[in-house]
Amino acid sequence: MINLEWFRTFSAIYECSSITEASKKVNMTQPGVSKHLSALEGYIGNKLFNRTTRKLVPTEYGKFLYAQINNPLQQLEKVEYYSNRRAKKAKPAITIGCTSDFFKNELKHKIYAFDMYIVSYFAGEDELIEALEADKIQLLIGTKMYDSYGHEFSFLKSEELVLICSNDIDVPKDIQVDDLQLIKWLQKQVWFSYSNRQQEIKKFWNAKFNVNPKIVPRYILPSYSEIVSVLKRNTGFSVVPKSFCKEELRNNTIKMPLQNSENVTQKQFYSYKLKNSNLKEITLFMEKMKVIEV
């Protein structure tokens, strides 16, 4: 079988017209260069150079062979060069699990500045927890402090939750100061919820009224952005993170029907497995999220 290094050595001899100079170019000893040349000539059955007193002169077959291999060799050297560069500058890689809402509202403004390979995996939180357990993702960003052995949680941020509704709704003034009447009235309204767990609604309700809500949401939309968008055109209530509706509130396309004197917050966490071969990348990602400003 022919050795591609023979061609590389032959090309160096052709361009340098000297065994000595060629050996420097390919970083080999002179005997090594001579062996490559002899092996190539023996393999193809033709003499490639004539030796003069001052230099090596290519034969007609040598000229023909050089013309045939010069361009392919250059292409191979480019592949080798860029492959080595990529190997030396290997970037950390990680698969992140989060909701599409979180990506649109938070991550997309930051991660494109990361010098990392990042795969985004979108799903609901229950599915994301399963994906983390199954090693489909290495890092989960969510709101649930679930109970799984060997999983670590790291606080990310708190976000304010607000009660919002469509502009065509007015809460009767006479019941706004009567919690019992207000609860009854609110429970009769059309509600949009992020999930059947009603996590956001329950947090707001407990902070506002100190009781659990008795609400059956008519619509479950697993996207805060979509809930806000729907309430701009349809009648109903919901509780969402304020960061998802700031612009709509400012533009008066939806409203907050009650004075929000209670500071209701929802925490977000990173979660990951402690036994994880990507702990270095996970730590790097979390650190970069802290320092990169939008």
Image: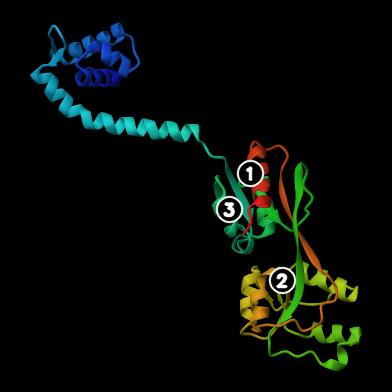
Q: Nearer the viewer, mark 3 or mark 1?
A: 3
What amino acid is at disc 3? Ile
Q: Which class describes the residues within 10 Å of circle 3: few (<14), some (14-19), or many (20+)?
A: some
Query: x%, y% of residue 126?
Result: 69, 57
Residue drawn 71% across and 83% down?
255
Residue drawn 55% across and 51% down?
113
Tell me the element at label 1: loop
Farthest residue toward the front?
Answer: 54
Cα distance, mark 2 to mark 1?
Answer: 32 Å
Q: Earlier in the sequence, mark 2 or mark 1?
A: 1
Tell me the element at label 2: helix
> For this view, does 39 lie left or right of residue 184?
left
Query: x%, y% of residue 174?
Result: 87, 93
Q: List the residue tagged with mark 1.
A: 135
Q: Which class describes the residues within 10 Å of circle 1: few (<14), some (14-19), or many (20+)?
A: some
Instruction: Specify the quadrant that holds the N terminus.
Output: top left
Residue 160: which quarter of the image?
A: bottom right
Residue drawn 53% across and 39% down?
91
Q: Nearer the viewer, residue 80 or 52?
A: 52
Q: List the residue tagged with mark 3.
A: 111
Q: List the residue tagged with mark 2.
A: 242
Instruction: Specify the quadrant that holds the C terminus.
Output: bottom right
